[in-house]
Image (cartoon, rainbow, N blue to C red):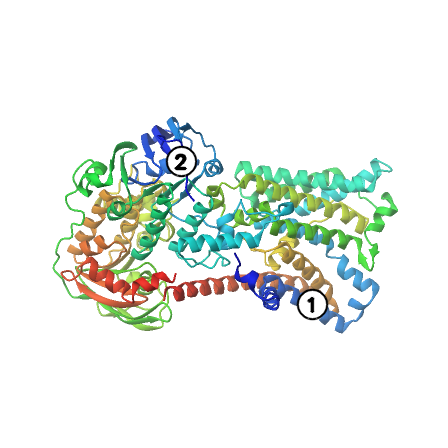
Amino acid sequence: MTTTTASAPAGQRILHALGGIAKARETGILVALVLVVIAATARNPNFLFSTDGFRDLLLTPSILLLVAVGQAIVIITRNVDLSVGSTLGLTAYLTGRLFIDVPGIPIILVFLIGLLFGGFLGLINGALIAFAKVPALVITLGTLYIYRGINVWWTGSDRINASDMPKDFLALGTKTILYIPVLTIIAVVVLIAAGWYLRNQRPGRELYAIGSDPAAANLYGLKVTQRVLVAFVVCGALAGLAGVLYSARYGTVNSQAGSGFELEAVGAAVIGGVAIFGGSGTVWGAAIGAYLLFTINRALPILGVQDFWQRAVVGVLIIGAIVLDRLLALRQTRKLTEARDNDND
Amino acid sequence: MTISHHAAGHAALELRDVSKSFGAVVALSSGSLRLENNSIHALIGENGAGKSTIVKIIAGLYQRDSGEFLLDGQSTDFTSTAQSKAAGIAVIYQEPTLFPDLSVTENIFMGRQPTRSLGRIDRRLMREEAVGLFRRLGVRIDPDRPTLGLSIADQQIIEIAKAISLDARVLVMDEPTAALSGVEVERLFAVARSLRDEGRALMFISHRFDEVFDLCDTVTVMRDGEYIATSPIAETTVDELVRRMVGRDVTNLFPKEVAPLGDDVLVVTNLSQPGVFHDVDFTVRAGEIVALAGLVGAGRSEIARAIFGVDPYSTGTVSISGTRVPRRNPGASMQLGLALVPEDRRKQGLVLESSVARNTTMAIQRTLSRFGLLFSSKENEAARQWASRLEVKTSALDTEVGTLSGGNQQKVVLAKWLATKPSVLIIDEPTRGIDVGTKAEVHRLLSELAGTGLAILMISSELPEVLGMADRVLVVREGRITASLARADATAESVMLAATQSAPATKEAVR
């Protein structure tokens, strides 16, 4: 059996694919990002055309990207994880402690422990939500404070300094391969893996189904509890990985590391077109959203926007993204309803 | 594709004396059912008879407390919906359970998509199979579009496509026709018959007898959680079934009394909203019941919502007793004496988590409140009056509305609006999903209300209801009133003709 897609000439198929890209929700946000970069570069060419400028452009948002990818996965299931900032902070401190308390510990082991520890914190979130049937917003708001509290209790007024960590590890934070920062490479590899999994694997698609209509997913016989649990574990693990990279990148870790990251991660996902009520959006969008958020923050001073307005611009961006989504959804509903009317004629 | 993997003599699915309780509430005391291959079996009974409980036990959503559950003669226990599905049972619930954000194709194959190496989903194969399924069902649905915005009829077709792709041996349909119009029901039945002829066992729940007699081979009646009787459809009659269902004779299903007609109360002139309805022009007199008939999706509910002011209209006027009703202002409409009982009472008419009293008085809160505060005593007083007049069966006024049966919920919605003392009542599908006994009660109530001089505009997809209740029938097709029939002229044929006028056969064939 041949379908229209299969039998269509290659040219038409490419046009079709291009049309799909033009219509994708992620395209708009990517265009916005490019415009911001162009505007900032026009004002100050060093923004893009200097080694440091180019590196920072890629490097700065990489850690948020990891957290935003995790957050997007959770939001797609119609949940939210507000504890990721605290998870990141706690893991970052753990990373420093490992280097201090276990001299000579292999860096790869530290990464592994960071992932596992973050995943464990995510598991606590997921288990409480899945089995206690309490909304994720409430549970993770609680663990946001609990994880941060543990961090404060553990760290006290202490802090990890760059001198406490091995040079090789710190170098990871700024090192580049072919002008691309290692941190960015790690983040993009995770992004590709997550994007591929969500699109091409059954459990990935089920996450969308669960977020689209949890009740229907139950009737359908999908493993809702298990999938949501795993989503939280992955989200926590990615926040943990981000924590390890955070300490490599910044060198100093105090008890407040990563606070506020949860909101930026949610913001990045929402700006990137991940519907806050679940069921639609991609990690690609969330990743571009993360880049847009941080790049705008860096570009605004160059463009001469006062400090005071910079936070407001982020707010406008988030609200704008939600309004845009709403409008697009309304338009689509109307279009689909009209199509139905026409079908009936 | 034929189903031949069953031993002769065994029923495809059999329940014997199955019971299920929730705490002190017995939902099912002794349910028995025998579904044969190659046959369509009807399960009928009033609301609360235990039909849904049986469906949920078969689906693996509930576990029975006692009794036997046999599949192909083998004792079976399902602890999840996934197990039931794996055993070849597909259940189509009353409300389609689809994922609105995902494509039609993904909805059909979710959880069991065809895969290639590395577990990659084979999208092309999946799409081809979906196209094949729709071709086989003889319907035209774009497999790539999201299910958001599909008509309920199309959503049900997708549920059926799902069931077929599962190669289900047993297909259970819980009131699949509740939201469908005549032509759509025919399409569904054609599909059901062809599935039966392939050797599958089907179960069909419906409140509409004509459908049961049209489609089914055998019928089982339940009452109050108990099995009453099973008989071949050819050897029974509607009267007999009704008697078994209610345990008594229902002498008059539609007791419409002739009420003296007064002046024009609701006058609608040239109401139009592009793309939705056009040149809608009619009046309803005091004491009159006017029915808006037509297919689902013809624009009847939209007209009602526009008159009430929930939806916009671009041109035309609405007036009540000579006073112009402002557009898009439900509050003003209510003050002018207009009341709207919406179609979807669970979503639009009731706050399910609130008490009967709170729901009943919701529309008159403003007049009940003292200094902006509501007092339960006053609320209960006002609610009691209406609850007792409408015979809402509930032990207490503080019962959560969500726990009441469909019929009683409908009465609470009615009570809520009648408490505003309207002069015009618009009621959308007054008896959808309500059992026979309560249906008659709702009809008696509407008839009584008309007798007191209320002007009633009733939207209904059930022809017997339209013909039995209405003094005048307005038929809507594609947003226009295509016929206005007096009670004496309205017949099933004349209404259906006006509703489908433009060559119905060819129109459906292309879908």
Mark 1 = which residue? A34
How far apart are labels 2 and 1 at the CA level? 56 Å
Based on the displayed image, in which of its 4 quarters is residue A12 positioned? bottom right
Q: Quadrant of the C terminus of chain B?
A: bottom left
Residue B15, position as x, y percentages in the image: 35, 31
**Which subunit holds the residue at mark 2?**
B
Residue at 51%, 58% (x, y): give it: B144
Q: Quadrant of the N terminus of chain B?
A: top left
The kind of secondary structure element at disc 2 is helix
Based on the displayed image, in which of its 4 quarters is residue A302 positioned? bottom right
Residue B253, position as x, y percentages in the image: 18, 47
Q: Are marks 2 and 1 in contact (CB under 8 Å)?
A: no
Amino acid found under the numbered disc labelled 2: Ile
Could you say which is closer to the camera, residue A182 or residue A221? A221
Q: Is residue B361 visible?
A: yes
Mark 2 = which residue? B58
